Amino acid sequence: MTAGYEPGYGQGYGPGYAAMPAPQPARKKGFDVLGLIAVIIAMVGLVPTLFVFLIGLIPEMNAIWWLLVALIPMLGIGGALVLLLAVIGLIVGITRKRRYGLSISGIVLGLLMLVPIGLLYFSSTV
């Protein structure tokens, strides 16, 4: 072999020569679909609850608190679903080295959805 001999880099393309590899296009970072779905489900569950809570603070609208009886089970089921999707999205994002910010937001919102149930469960009544 002669000094400076590198097959495929300017020496020709006959038999015995390796072809120069084509440059690979830069891969785009993937989008966090599971995190986005988790955040959307969390917003669907949290916005009506926030609405009922804010309306219930008005003195003339105290009768609206009964709606929380229907909303709290929805928060529990939705919070569990949001946490499941967000944790799976976080694991997939970390293992594939992609974005996972929405999954972290989904985890926070899922925990926020479970707070009212935790307050009811752990509240001490004398």
Image (tube, rainbow, N blue to C red):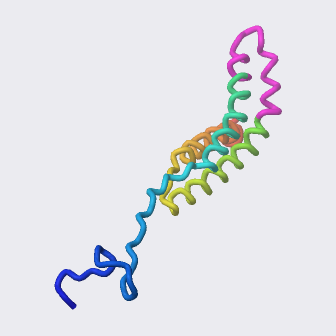
Does residue 33 appear left or right of residue 97 in this picture?
right
Residue at the (77%, 15%) spot, across then down: 62
Placement of the C terminus among the 4 image quadrants? top right
Q: Is residue 21 visible?
A: yes
Measured along the vertical axis of the image, is residue 43 above or below residue 91? above
Measured along the vertical axis of the image, is residue 51 above or below residue 92? above
- Judge whether residue 25 is colored magenta: no
- Place of residue 88 in the rendered image (x, y in percent of width and height, measured from the top left): 62, 57
Q: Is residue 124 visible?
A: no
Q: Dominant secondary structure of the magenta stretch?
A: helix
Placement of the N terminus among the 4 image quadrants? bottom left
Residue at the (73%, 9%) spot, across then down: 59
Q: Which residues are magenta?
A: 52-71
Q: Residue furthest top?
A: 60
Work out whether residue 32 or residue 81 is closer to the camera in this orientation and state it: 32
Q: Residue furthest left?
A: 3
- Place of residue 108 in the rendered image (x, y in percent of width and height, measured from the top left): 57, 42
Work out whether residue 73 or residue 20 is closer to the camera in this orientation and state it: 20
Residue at the (68%, 26%) spot, across then down: 50
Work out whether residue 37 or residue 124 is closer to the camera in this orientation and state it: 37
- Where residue 60 sits, quadrant-wise, is top right
- Where residue 9 sits, quadrant-wise, is bottom left
- Place of residue 97 in the rendered image (x, y in percent of width and height, measured from the top left): 48, 59
Q: How many marks?
A: 0
Measured along the vertical axis of the image, is residue 69 above or below residue 63? below
Residue at the (51%, 63%) spot, across then down: 95
- Place of residue 104 in the rendered image (x, y in percent of width and height, measured from the top left): 54, 46
Q: Residue furthest bottom?
A: 1
